[in-house]
Image (cartoon, rainbow, N blue to C red):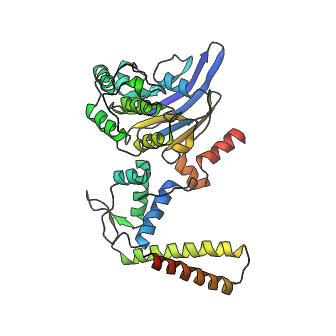
Amino acid sequence: MTVKFNNRDPVYVQVIRHFKEQIAKGYFEPGQEIPSRRELANQLKINPNTAQRAYKEMEEQGLIFTEGNMPSCITKDEAVLKSVREELIIEAVDLFLGSIKSIDVPLSEVLELVKKKHDAESGEAEESK
Amino acid sequence: MIEVKNVEKKYGRKRVLKGLSFTAEKGEITCLIGINGVGKTTIMKAIMALTPINSGEILIDGKKIRKESFEKVTFIPDTITMLPQMKICDAFSFMADFYKNWDPQRAEELLQFFKLDPTERIANLSKGNMAKVNMILGLALNVDYLLMDEPFSGIDIFSREQIAEVFTSHLIEDRGVIITTHEISDIEHLIDRAVLIDNGEVLKEFSVEEVREKEGKSVVDVMREVYRG
């Protein structure tokens, strides 16, 4: 598990995003145990205080839960997990729309291109398998 | 907490520290940033009482530094202070003789982490490996505070990465660290607080995550504003 951090967003926010991406991809299953704060700091090469902060925030957002002295786990709440995926998709679409807007192209042209590119890429992926 | 309050230091007629103040908390990594010659090393020496100060006060957990304080706080200078003909294991037993707080198990763990051979003579080590041994001598002491002077300067990128990795581990956790550097990029993600120093004065002191969160600025962005703005 490695993450490339940028210098301008708080590291803890980037860590949370990393977890959300893993959840959306289905890499983390509902109720799955996650690394301890100390392990996470070591894996991601971050300050243990930052790992602590990220976990605290994720707990407040309901993404993870901790029972007593047990290791923290990914939430089992389907609604939360679904909203994580949606949130990431909407974010990506917004970003895309933002960059499209600045070059002023009609949506139909763009959508066709997106589909073509996407098909070509997934075709390549199929072949390489 | 280490409190540096209004410290003034002169070398002859030259004022090196001009009423400098900052604090460093336990459990946090505080980075003193500034170009060469702004007084970073002098501050560390002053905290360790290795050099007298002309005025001001330095407190460690509310107390002035005494003989017993050296079991509580340690200084890792930018060059190794052991005799060059010593083997690494000799240097370790030297430390064990001098400090009650020397933790041989932790020293062993660090040797393995850095992949060093204890029978190697210090004089024969590469610069990077010498820096690593120097780090071990400080890190294997069970102290609450560690002062590190330019641990990354003049060594190769992989050694730098290895040393930086120490900061993400239990070897540092819960301790207070003050580190000086003029090359922030190695540890930008790892520090809690930054203290920007120029000309013997603190120009700005801030929490790095807070500045990223509230202003969307990196440490280097803030440095550019402060030093060049």
Residue at 44% across / 67% down in the picture?
A20
- Does A99 appear above or below B169? below
- The residue sitting at the front extreme is A127
Image quadrant where residue B228 sits: top right
| Horizontal arrangement in the rendering, residue A65 relative to residue B223 (left or right) | left
Which percent across, then down, holds residue B158?
A: 47, 43
Is residue B10 visible from the viewing direction of this image?
yes
Residue at 28% across / 35% down in the picture?
B108
- Does B51 appear above or below B125? above
Which quadrant, please, contains the N terminus of chain B? Answer: top left
Q: Nearer the viewer, residue A83 or B122?
A: B122
Q: Nearer the viewer, residue A121 or B180?
A: A121
Q: Nearer the viewer, residue A118 or B218?
A: A118
- Does B207 appear above or below A91? above
Which percent across, then down, holds residue B168?
A: 41, 46
Image quadrant where residue A31 sits: bottom left
